[in-house]
Image (tube, rainbow, N blue to C red):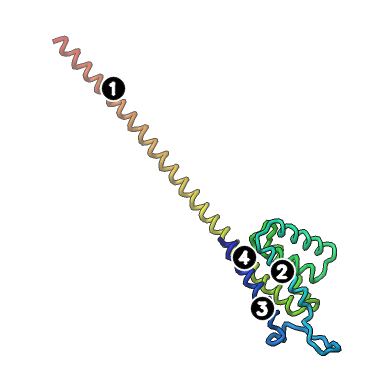
Amino acid sequence: MLNGKLTIAALASIGLVAMALSGCSQTSDWIKGRSNSETGDPAIVGAAEVEKLIADLGQIASGDPAAQAELFADAAAAAQLTPNALTNLRFGLILAIPGHPESDPERAQSILREVLAQTILLTPAEISLATIHLNNVERQIVANSDARRQQVSRTRTANTQEQALKKRLATIEADNRQLRQDLEDAEQKLEAITSIERSIREQE
């Protein structure tokens, strides 16, 4: 259930960044860099890279195991062979998406923090994407930690209850053994008394 909620949150954040990119020419000067070309048309610096990142995250979140494995392998290889802010960002974002076998929020947190320490090498859109997913994985880590603590607490409580039940059963069993012994003793005494009475009557 937790993974499902986090996947929805991750998809929502992807959508928010995509919307910001689609409308940045009118409303988001903070997310764009302009270059003065001969035509004078504004260009969004890094838009293609961010769109590729969003497409990759969409495929990871889609649940297709083959696509997930391929994208993870490609991102991991790129981050290892050509480490830079963009390849590390891509790898960190893929690790941050929950619900696939290679999801690793703790590792994603570490990588995204390192990436955000190099903001001079990133576009504003890339910084926003990294920040959104870093916040998501940090919440996920806290939620996972809380879930583990609750599980440990439930296990401890269950163990305590089990031990108490075993002790109670052992006490009941010991009481039953004592009752059986007392009953046997009483039957033996009754039989002895009956035998004595029978002997006295026979003598009379």
For the residue carrying disc 1, how many other residues have a C-alpha within 10 Å: few (<14), some (14-19), or many (20+)?
Answer: few
Residue with the most extreme right position: 38
Please report whichever mark, 2 or 4, sits nearer to the chain's N-terminal start: 4
Task: Tell which tag, 2 or 4, sits nearer the viewer.
Answer: 2
Observer-nearest residue: 29 or 81? 29
Residue with the most extreme top position: 203
The amino acid sitting under disc 2 is Ala
Separation of disc 2 and disc 3 at Cα? Answer: 13 Å
Image quadrant for the C terminus? top left
Above/below status of 136 relative to 201: below
Q: Which residue is mark 4?
A: 7
The image's mark for residue 55 is 2
Please report whichever mark, 2 or 1, sits nearer to the chain's N-terminal start: 2
Separation of disc 4 and disc 1 at Cα? Answer: 75 Å
Observer-nearest residue: 186 or 117? 117
Q: How many numbered marks are there? A: 4
Q: Which residue is mark 3?
A: 19
